[in-house]
C-alpha cells in the first residue's frame, strides 16, 4: 500500500518544462518541495522549484544523487529514457509506475488502452505504411492528422 507523503517531503520531477512548473507550484501550496532533474539549462520549472539538477538522462552519478535527495519521483513528460528509470527505481519509488509510462509513450498503445477502458477517442488507425494510410483515409476520412507513434 502506498503511504501519503509527509509535509515537507521532496518530490523529484523528471523534466523541467511547463508541466513541471505547474506541478512544482501546486506541490508548494500543499507543503512539498520539488527537485527538478532537467538536461536543458534554465528550465521553466527551475524558477519555482526548490532545487534543480542540470544533467543528462545518461549521467548515472547525477541520477543517483538526484534520487537520493528526494522522497518520490515523478515525471512531467512521457519520453524519459528507460535506462534512467531503471537506475532511479532502484533508489526511490517512481509514481505513476512504469506501466503508465509504457502506455503513454506510444500513441497507438495509449489510444487502444483508452478505448479498451470504454472511453471515447477520436477515430484513429495504425498507419505503418502508405497502404495503411490509404485505408485509414478511406475509413476515417478527411480532415485527419497523421502523428508518429513515439516522440515528437
Image (cartoon, rainbow, N blue to C red):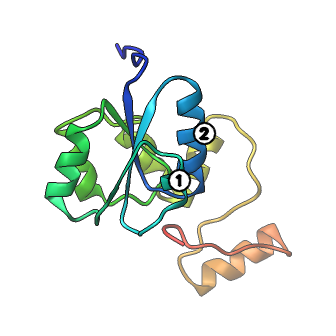
Of badges 1 and 2, the one in the foreground is: 1
Would you identify the image quadrant in which residue 126 lies? bottom right
Residue pictured at 76% horizontal, 76% vertical: 137
Direction left: furthest residue: 61
Residue pictured at 30% horizontal, 29% vertical: 71
Task: Judge whether 18 appears above or below 13 on screen.
Answer: below
Task: Judge whether 62 appears above or below 140 on screen.
Answer: above
Would you identify the image quadrant in which residue 139 lies? bottom right
Relative image position of residue 82 (x, y in whole percent): 29, 56
Does residue 83 appear in this view?
Answer: yes
Q: Which quadrant: the C terminus?
A: bottom right
Task: Answer left or right for 84 relative to 114.
Answer: left
User: Who comes first in sequence, dot 1 or dot 2?
Assistant: 1
Relative image position of residue 41 (x, y in whole percent): 42, 69
Q: Which residue is mark 2?
A: 116
Task: Answer left or right for 148 relative to 64.
Answer: right
Instruction: Count numbered badges in the picture.
Output: 2
Does residue 87 appear in this view?
Answer: no
Relative image position of residue 125 (x, y in whole percent): 65, 65
Which is more toward the observer, 29 or 118?
Answer: 29
Q: Which residue is mark 1?
A: 47
Calculate the distance from the C-alpha at mark 1 to the C-alpha at mark 2. 40 Å
Task: Answer left or right for 146 relative to 17.
Answer: right
Around disc 1, counting alpha carbons within 10 Å, would you say few (fewer than 14), some (14 to 19), or many (20 or more)? some
Relative image position of residue 120 (x, y in whole percent): 75, 43
Amino acid at each position: 500500500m502506498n503511504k501519503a507523503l509527509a509535509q515537507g517531503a521532496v518530490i523529484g520531477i523528471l523534466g523541467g518544462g511547463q508541466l513541471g512548473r505547474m506541478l512544482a507550484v501546486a506541490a508548494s501550496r500543499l507543503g512539498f518541495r520539488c527537485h527538478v532533474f532537467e538536461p536543458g539549462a534554465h528550465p521553466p520549472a527551475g524558477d519555482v522549484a526548490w532545487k534543480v539538477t542540470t544533467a543528462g538522462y545518461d549521467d548515472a552519478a547525477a541520477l543517483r544523487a538526484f534520487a537520493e535527495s528526494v522522497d518520490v519521483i515523478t515525471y512531467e513528460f512521457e519520453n524519459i529514457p528507460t535506462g534512467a528509470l531503471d537506475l532511479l527505481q532502484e533508489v526511490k519509488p517512481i509514481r505513476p509506475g512504469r506501466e503508465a509510462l509504457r502506455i503513454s509513450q506510444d500513441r497507438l498503445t495509449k489510444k487502444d488502452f483508452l478505448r479498451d477502458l470504454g472511453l471515447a477517442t477520436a477515430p484513429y488507425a495504425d498507419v505503418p505504411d502508405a497502404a495503411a494510410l490509404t485505408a485509414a483515409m478511406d475509413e476515417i476520412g478527411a480532415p485527419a492528422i497523421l502523428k508518429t507513434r513515439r516522440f515528437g
